[in-house]
Image: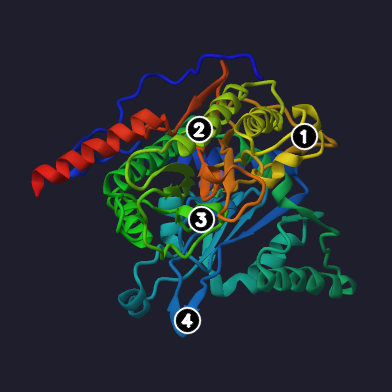
Amino acid sequence: MARPRRSTEPRRRAVVGTRRGPELPGAPPPPLGRDEYARRRRALMREMGRDAIAVIAAAPVHLRNNDVEYAYRQDSDFHHLTGFGEPESVAVLVPGRPQGEYLLFVRDRDPTRETWDGRRAGPAGACRDFGADDAFPIADIDEILPGLMESRARVFYTVGVNRDFDQRLVGWVNGLRAQAKHGRHAPHEIVALEHALHEMRLFKSRGEVEQMRHAARIAAAAHLRAMRHCRPGVFEYEIAAEIRHEFHRADADISYLPIVGGGANGCILHYRENASLLRDGELLLIDAGCEFRHYASDITRTFPVNGRFDAAQRAAYDLVLEANRAAIEAVRPGEHWNRPHEVAVQVLTAGMVRLGLLKGRVPTLIKEEAYRRFYMHKTGHWLGMDVHDVGEYKIGDAWRALEPGMVLTIEPGLYIPPGTRGVPPEFRNIGIRIEDDVLVTREGHEVLTDGVPKDADAIEAVMAAARAARSTAS
Ligand code: GLY
Ligand code: MN
Ligand code: MN
């Protein structure tokens, strides 16, 4: 087990409940400024070098059914470099171009379309409000972009995310090649933009960490609200609605489909139906995080539907909590990425033997991965603009070292569905995961998600207080 180390988390005001429910999670931080986006573009251009051009497309609009669209979510890479939220946009970086290095192609202003669909920045707004050196209507891109590419040897571009745009990019390059006999030059290489960009995104700036702290506080308030509303006879979707309520009233949205799984549903890792009745005597597993200004939180808490753990639930829960805490203690600079997972596996496997779920020697059970019967996923992932955020986990063949500014989740679990053979019967129908978001700091780590309790007694106290408040009110 990792050497215990004190968390550097300053004491933070817990999200306190009132009669009306949890309070809002405090004032939001200032949004990221234009200077931060400009810094990112400059850093990327330094990596690219002078003979290159980068082309980054906005996310396409997706239809949900017939003519109804999904809520628009800007592409994370595009947003990271521009802060520009409109679809049908393309950002172009041309390092060293005397007339301006940062160009945006955007939808033109159109009073009729804006009456129906909403405001547009237009090219003038793209320069005025988003710092573009030059901006053009997206309809003109076929005429303008090949000319910008012509003098450059390499195009930085992410292939395979937007198939339609891939075709267009290849079309522009091939169009230039076809005109070689007329003296035009074509770039000779398409370079994976994401290599450089995703390495940059892995390290969060001070401003980004502030957004992520806030996203974590909102999600913590939502989990507290869920604990307070939970009781036997309520449906999973009602709890999911309470969570979404807390997100939306804080100007956030879900960062992934919430998992609200009672009893056996808690053993389905990506359970999404959220349709069952919550029953007395069962556990409820909630994995729900929000996205605030494009930054995600990702929290899992597990608690008894009736507010009181029985003995077996408590023993299993305390084991997962021990793994969660031990893995968090392993988060510090210089430790390698996989160390928290190794620590969690060690704690969980020893505990599985103690509880009678596995038989044998712990080192052998770990070597043979016997624990995977009850713990089949990894202990975490990078977290940032994407809930499963970008960034390499290995450098060459070796796990990379944790460094200040990285954010990751720690999420050990234990899953014993009903009908599991060869285990003490009292442990059947138990699915537990406890997930926190953790920032690597210079001194060690900061847990971003400690606004929601995870100690079993503390959870029971929150639920008992809510029960008491309900009975006084009725
Ligand atoms: N909610 C997705 C995950 O925990 O990885
Ligand atoms: Mn996660
Ligand atoms: Mn999660």
Amino acid type indicated by mark 4: Asn
Left or right: where does residue 397 sit relative to residue 80?
right
Distance from the alpha carbon under mark 4 to that under mark 1: 49 Å
Residue tagged 4: 65
Question: How many residues crowd mark 1 within 10 Å: few (<14), some (14–19), many (20+)?
Answer: some
Determine the secondary structure under disc 4.
strand
Q: Residue 288: percent from the left, percent from the top?
A: 44, 49
Determine the secondary structure under disc 2.
helix
Question: How many residues crowd mark 2 within 10 Å: few (<14), some (14–19), many (20+)?
Answer: some
Q: Residue 12: percent from the left, percent from the top?
A: 34, 24
Residue tagged 3: 264
Tags 4 and 1 touching, CB below 8 Å: no
Residue tagged 2: 315
State which mark lies toward you, 4 or 2: 2
Residue located at (34% from left, 29% from top) = 458
Tags 2 and 1 touching, CB below 8 Å: no
Q: Of marks 3 and 4, which one's residue comes earlier in the chain? A: 4
Kindly tell me whether mark 1's CB lies below 8 Å from ligand 1. Answer: no
Amino acid type indicated by mark 2: Ala
Up the image or down, 155 lies above or below 392; here it is: below
Tags 3 and 4 touching, CB below 8 Å: no
Distance from the alpha carbon under mark 1 to that under mark 3: 25 Å
Amino acid type indicated by mark 1: Leu
Kindly tell me whether mark 4's CB lies below 8 Å from ligand 1. Answer: no
Q: Residue 119: percent from the left, percent from the top?
A: 35, 67
Residue tagged 1: 365
State which mark lies toward you, 4 or 1: 1
Q: Of marks 1 and 3, which one's residue comes earlier in the chain? A: 3
Distance from the alpha carbon under mark 2 to that under mark 3: 18 Å
Distance from the alpha carbon under mark 2 to that under mark 1: 20 Å
73 or 472, nearer to the observer:
472
